[in-house]
Image (tube, rainbow, N blue to C red):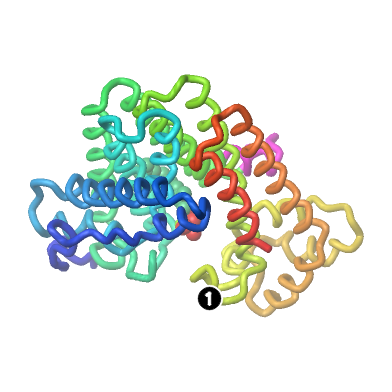
Amino acid sequence: MEAAVGAGSNNGAGTSVSTDLPAARLIARLAPGEPEFESRMRESLARAEKWLQATAQEALDPRVAALIGHLADAGGKRLRPLLVLLGAEFGDPWADGVTQAATIAELVHIASLYHDDVMDGAATRHGVPSVHARFGERAAVLGGDLLLARAAQLAADLGPAAVHLNARTAGRLVAGQLRELAGPGPDEDPVTHYFHVAAGKTAALLAMSLGIGAVQAGAPAPAAAALTEYGEQLGIAFQIADDLLDLKSPAGVTGKERGKDLLAGVASLPVLLARESTDPDDAELCALLAAGPVPPAALPRALELFERSAALAEAEAVMQRRLERARTALGALPALPARRALLALCDYVALRTS
Ligand code: FPP
Ligand code: MG
């Protein structure tokens, strides 16, 4: 039976807001030696965090506030607000609406996680029980809807450009997830299908984050377009990096068990490439993956075969090409600390997998 919405206490509204968010620590690593830039980013991230806590839970029954504050309180990297703020650096970073734009990006992200965890039956997220584990599935779905509604409300306050970006992105997220659910069509190449899913599920929101930040800050249109393209490419690379981490990361680095995707039969890019591989060295791996989820007893062998497979190397090469496209998109932007940070973010994504 589902737990009642009122099972928890209000753990969100009114709590103090940390200025040492993971995104703030990341920015110091991405653009070292830029104290003014770093302190502006820290301050803006903290403001966005306050908005996140307040907007999500404003004027709600404390039990519902606890429901929709659950994941925001649990943590998260705040990568999307960071991208909004980096996009805003190419205009006036203090312009009205930049903080709200950062809040919108995180609200949409969190809303999608509420729904995703229900769909995946995930027990935990960010090291705490998933929303549905604590509040029940029906409440989790409605909590996600409410967060999405709050994002739409904030976008309406910002004007038609933000409304459009927010609506289009939410649509791309849902369409990407539906496409993943449906699997490749009868005549569709599974790798092409993979890229469509990754573009919707992952890249769309990263692209929107950079774009909405630039637009709210009044950056020139070509800069906003370049930043959006950067986000699209970074997003695909990010998804592939995630796929690679499942196969490569020592236990504990990602907080997820190594090979979890293989056991669950997830059609990650390395898996799809291994299935298609004609390299004789990949033959045993190909046979292991052909039947769908890898049986637990075969996991150590599958991971061992992956380590030296052409498929893994090819997936890494695809990720590197996407990162190169992301870097190229930044080519014409002014040499601001934010551009340096975005370039370094590409290296950071690649480094996570090496
Ligand atoms: C995580 O994927 C999920 C996403 C990045 C997006 C999921 C999108 C939806 C559920 C559509 C609904 C969207 C909105 C805006 C309400 P994953 O399961 O591969 O990764 P994980 O390991 O982090 O769970
Ligand atoms: Mg999931």
Left or right: residue 141 versus residue 87 is left
Along the line of sight, which residue is nearer the eye, 179 or 312? 312
Left or right: residue 178 versus residue 162 is right
Q: Residue furthest bottom?
A: 297
Which image quarter is the C terminus in?
A: bottom right
Left or right: residue 117 versus residue 346 is left
Ligand 1 within 8 A of label 1's CB?
A: no
Residue type for callout 1 = Gly
Provide residue 158's location: percent of width, then percent of height.
26, 27
Which image quarter is the N terminus in?
A: bottom left
Along the line of sight, which residue is nearer the eye, 247 or 118? 247
The residue range painted magenta reads: 184-196
Provide residue 266's location: percent of width, then percent of height.
59, 57
Residue neighbourhood size for the residue with mark 1, other residues' Cα within 10 Å, grouped as few (<14), some (14–19), many (≥20): few
Magenta region includes residue 235: no
Along the line of sight, which residue is nearer the eye, 256 or 232? 232
Residue located 68% across and 74% down the image:
299
Residue located 15% across and 68% down the image:
7
Residue located 67% across and 79% down the image:
297
Quadrant in which residue 307 is drawn: bottom right
Residue annotated with mark 1: 252
